[in-house]
Amino acid sequence: MQVGGVGRKRNYFLSEVNALPSFTHGKLQQTITLVIFGKLLDRADLVDRCGYPAAFIKALLVALYWSGFRISEWIGAISHKTTRKDGSVHYTPPFPALIKEQMWVDETNKVLFVRQVARKNGHRDSPIQIPLDLPYVNLLVDRWQKTAPGKPVFPISNVTWWRILKRIDPKLYSHFFIMNRLTKQAEDREISLKEQEDWSGKSPATIARYRAHAGRDTQHAGERMKYES
């Protein structure tokens, strides 16, 4: 019997092969290696993709992995109702998907530029710069090149993307890629808090939490213990 274009036996197989590390508190707490990310990309060839080509899904995974952007900063978001603690109802403004003109390649410096404003009270003035020689970036560049002028690079709904992502790995969710990228940046002592702010568009307080999550300060404190007399 086929379910969504993928047989039950294959779905069972995918659920039994752990690409992502296990977790016990509802969310992934650790970053992933490029080896694990490569396995996630490979799974895009095997699952029901709701009619989308594997190359499209892989390119969006690469976009999330290297940028650390919110998924809505790539695919856009429709207005939806929210209820605040005081019981008042509000509607979030729609957010447009990133279009082809918001990306460009600098062949001289071998960099892919991506310009996108930050959502949810964030602030990002400058485009981020993704080196072209990073693993799998060619998949993202290829998707951008195939996008028609004025059109979204990733025309897909959030619901459809969520379904595909869960088929790739049940433990996977879009917001994980924000944690993954910002934690990896925080682990690098050469990357300043200001540089992370400019990249992510998030507030200093939010970035500080990711730096704490990475053990940025406790690592230094631990190293200094070596010099106790």
Image: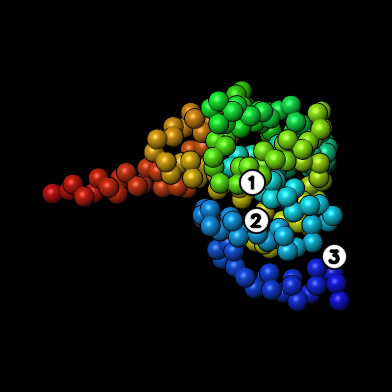
- Whether residue 33 is visible to the viewer of this picture, yes or no, is yes
* Image quadrant in which the N terminus is located: bottom right
152, above or below 23, in the image: above
At x 81%, y 52%, the residue is: 52
Crowding at dot 2, Cα within 10 Å, few <14 / some 14-19 / many 20+, comes out as many
Q: Position of residue 158 (x, y in %)?
A: 78, 47
Q: Position of residue 24 (x, y in %)?
A: 57, 65
At x 64%, y 39%, the residue is: 69
Labelled pair 2, 1 in contact (Cβ < 8 Å): yes
Relative horizontal placement of residue 31, taking residue 85 as reference (left or right): left
The residue carrying mark 1 is 62
The residue carrying mark 2 is 41
The residue carrying mark 3 is 4
- Whether residue 128 is visible to the viewer of this picture, yes or no, is no
Local secondary structure at mark 3: loop
| N-term mark: 3 or 2 | 3
Distance in Å between CA atoms under marks 3 and 1? 24 Å
| N-term mark: 3 or 1 | 3
At x 72%, y 36%, the residue is: 144
- Tell us which disc is closer to us: 3 or 2: 2
Kind of residue at badge 2:
Leu
Relative horizontal placement of residue 68, taking residue 184 as reference (left or right): right
At x 75%, y 76%, the residue is: 9
208, above or below 40, in the image: above
Kind of residue at badge 1:
Val
Labelled pair 3, 2 in contact (Cβ < 8 Å): no
Kind of residue at badge 3:
Gly
60, above or below 196, in the image: below
Local secondary structure at mark 1: helix
Distance in Å between CA atoms under marks 3 and 2? 19 Å
